[in-house]
């Protein structure tokens, strides 16, 4: 097959037109409409709804806001994808009896989440977004990347692509690897880390099926007026057991199609027990019969197994203008649906770096270096979330406390940090990297405490992360400490992330005290390690309080929302005018009447003319 040198040089070549690559392309084109982008993928513009299915259908607040707000896809998501009402959690009351959902203890989403999120049919979404990108100006090359020549510094990189008819060599200053587990750049640069020794002990696999036309009433009939104002079915439902957890995600609203899958930890549940469809079904029948019955009620669409789910990268954004995003960069566990959130942070950072370098901004390299450290730091905190899951997942009491504590940080820090675009503020990023490291160490200490209590079969009670009667002062983990939703504080750096961090620290300290008292009594409260942890969170709270003071001084003259403020200024010249403009109908009526009069006059004139002629 002949090698053809592509005459056109691109600003960016994106290898892979899946979720991450397509979102990256759209984000770049929206931020800089004249940017030249090539998208390379071996799949055509028409995606097979069977062959192209993949996990990762669930979004949470950060990724949902990115898709809806930053990519302008809210209408599309409402019209074409599935609404999502939070995360539900279920533990068997007895492993021997799991026939119905009533055989489980639950944490149900009990109300409408304040920030909307969605479940996504990935095949349909990617097919639609690819067509949108092409219409917007991206050049799609339907071919397979067979090699990439990554050059140092700002020299042009070369990507070799084999299409159906030829082998192309395309050039671009910036190259993004969004090709997933092909690891094009990861293998080329020895950039990948695998194995529990590099992943805080995480050693997991994934097994899943897609099934359609299920009898959803086997899960829930949709009637629960005393406990929730939203659907239980249209949530991401999590089922727990020893060394494993399962998801149940609806991915369409017409065919009752579900994604049902399991993350399992090899040290507790070996791959040989769940690595085929038959083995997975046998496992479900024995341990989660309600899910087995759901699958049996419908038609299985596909089955997949990953023996090794987790990995990460040593570098995300290189000084040599290559970048990794999505599964090509890192993945840890599907719990909390964090994959698309990791993608979101990476995409926005890549866009900032690429545009800064194309514009030859003086701080472009600093952006690249700081965003790389920040993204790696955030990735590590996500990795830390799954530390010792294998020992705790099946313990309803311990996991309910763990979920509650992790939710404090998610809603109190990560969500406002993203909404306020603080992950793009270089000074804030540099300080936050140190916080990420301290936060992971805090979590590890708590997880060690959880392990002790799990071994002792302790019952601390059951914390519900959605209720406001679990901690103090009517606190709920989804509480916002800034009125950003009410006053549309969506412009960069308008949201008071420091106030959110301060309050999150306060409730984290309250949780720590309650946890140590319930789990270990007075000795637990007086433990040097516990006192050290409380002191660290308190110091973080003081840091946040000082940051809030500076923030309020700097933003005291800024409006919450510039567009709203502009409208208010314009409104100062408004005067009520008590009159109506003629409607189109009245205009037409007048025109018709006028035309009729003219016709009559013309007829009369013609008649007079005839009479005069006759007289003459």
Image (cartoon, helix red, strand yellow):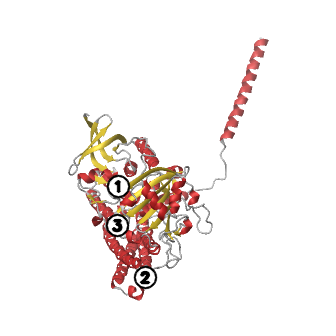
Q: Is residue 231 left or right of residue 207?
A: right
Mark number displayed over residue 300: none
Whether residue 277 appears in this view of the structure is yes
Return the disc, 2 or 3, that comes first in the chain's sequence.
3
The residues tagged by marks 2 and 1 sit, at their Cα atoms, a distance apart of: 38 Å
The quarter of the picture where the C terminus appears is top right
Q: Is residue 197 left or right of residue 31?
A: left
Note whether 297 is above or below 224 in the view shown: above
Q: Answer few, some or many: residues within 10 Å of disc 2's Cα (few below 14, many 20 plus, some between 14 and 19).
A: some
Label 3 belongs to which residue?
Answer: 267
Q: Nearer the viewer, mark 2 or mark 3?
A: 3
Q: What percent of the width, then of the height, locates residue 513?
A: 42, 82
The residues tagged by marks 2 and 3 sit, at their Cα atoms, a distance apart of: 26 Å
Return the disc, 2 or 1, that comes first in the chain's sequence.
1
Q: What percent of the width, then of the height, locates residue 216?
A: 56, 57
Mark number displayed over residue 519: 2
The secondary structure type at the circle numbered 2 is: helix
Q: Nearer the viewer, residue 78 or 106?
A: 106
The quarter of the picture where the N terminus appears is top left
Label 1 belongs to which residue?
Answer: 327
Note whether 163 is above or below 415 in the view shown: above
Whether residue 60 appears in this view of the structure is no
The secondary structure type at the circle numbered 3 is: loop
Q: Nearer the viewer, mark 2 or mark 1?
A: 2
The residues tagged by marks 1 and 3 sit, at their Cα atoms, a distance apart of: 24 Å
């Amino acid at each position: 097959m002949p090698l053809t040198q592509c005459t056109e040089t691109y600003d960016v070549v994106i290898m892979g037109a899946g979720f991450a690559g397509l979102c990256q392309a759209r984000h770049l084109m929206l931020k800089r409409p004249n940017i030249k982008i090539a998208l390379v993928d071996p799949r055509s513009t028409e995606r097979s709804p069977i062959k192209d299915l993949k996990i990762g259908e669930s979004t949470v607040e950060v990724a949902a806001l990115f898709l809806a707000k930053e990519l302008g896809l809210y209408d599309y998501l409402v019209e074409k994808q599935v609404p999502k009402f939070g995360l539900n959690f279920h533990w068997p009351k007895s492993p021997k009896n799991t026939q119905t959902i009533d055989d489980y203890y639950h944490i149900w989403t009990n109300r409408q989440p304040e920030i909307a999120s969605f479940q996504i049919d990935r095949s349909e979404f990617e097919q639609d977004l690819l067509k949108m990108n092409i219409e917007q100006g991206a050049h799609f090359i339907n071919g397979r990347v067979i090699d990439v020549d990554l050059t140092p510094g700002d020299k042009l990189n070369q990507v070799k692509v084999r299409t159906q008819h030829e082998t192309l060599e395309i050039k671009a200053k910036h190259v993004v690897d969004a090709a997933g587990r092909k690891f094009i750049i990861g293998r080329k640069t020895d950039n990948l880390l695998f194995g529990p020794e590099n992943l805080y002990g995480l050693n997991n696999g994934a097994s899943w099926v897609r099934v359609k036309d299920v009898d959803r009433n086997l899960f829930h009939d949709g009637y629960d007026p005393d406990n929730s104002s939203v659907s239980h079915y249209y949530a991401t439902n999590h089922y727990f057991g020893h060394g494993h957890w399962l998801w149940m995600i609806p991915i369409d609203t017409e065919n009752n199609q579900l994604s049902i899958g399991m993350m399992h930890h090899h040290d507790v549940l070996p791959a040989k027990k769940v690595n085929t469809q038959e083995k997975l079904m046998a496992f479900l029948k024995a341990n989660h019969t309600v899910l087995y019955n759901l699958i049996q009620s419908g038609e299985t669409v596909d089955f997949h197994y990953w023996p090794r789910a987790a990995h990460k990268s040593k570098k995300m954004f290189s000084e040599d203008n290559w970048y990794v995003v999505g599964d090509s960069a890192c993945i840890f566990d599907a719990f909390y649906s964090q994959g698309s959130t990791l993608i979101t942070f990476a995409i926005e950072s890549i866009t900032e770096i690429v545009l800064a370098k194309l514009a030859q901004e003086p701080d472009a390299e600093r952006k690249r270096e700081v965003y790389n450290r920040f993204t790696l730091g955030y990735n590590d905190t996500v990795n830390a979330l799954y530390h010792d899951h294998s020992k705790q997942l099946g313990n309803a009491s311990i996991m309910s406390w763990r979920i509650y504590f992790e939710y404090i940080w998610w809603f109190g820090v990560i969500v406002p940090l993203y909404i306020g675009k603080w992950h793009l503020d270089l000074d804030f990023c540099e300080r936050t990297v140190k916080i990420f490291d301290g936060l992971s160490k805090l979590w590890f200490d708590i997880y060690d405490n959880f392990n002790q209590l799990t071994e002792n079969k302790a019952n601390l009670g059951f914390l519900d992360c959605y209720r406001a009667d679990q901690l103090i002062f009517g606190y709920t983990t989804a509480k916002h400490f800034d009125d950003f939703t009410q006053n549309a504080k969506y412009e960069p750096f308008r949201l008071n992330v420091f106030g959110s961090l301060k309050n999150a620290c306060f409730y984290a300290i309250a949780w720590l005290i309650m946890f140590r008292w319930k789990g270990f009594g007075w000795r637990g409260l007086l433990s040097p390690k516990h006192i050290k942890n409380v002191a660290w969170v308190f110091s973080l709270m003081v840091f946040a309080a000082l940051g809030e003071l500076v923030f309020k001084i700097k933003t005291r003259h800024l409006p919450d929302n510039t567009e709203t403020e502009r409208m208010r200024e314009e409104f100062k010249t408004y005067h009520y005018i008590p009159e109506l403009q003629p409607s189109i109908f009245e205009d037409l009526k007048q025109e018709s009447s006028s035309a009729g009069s003219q016709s009559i006059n013309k007829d009369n004139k013609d008649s007079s003319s005839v009479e005069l002629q006759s007289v003459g």
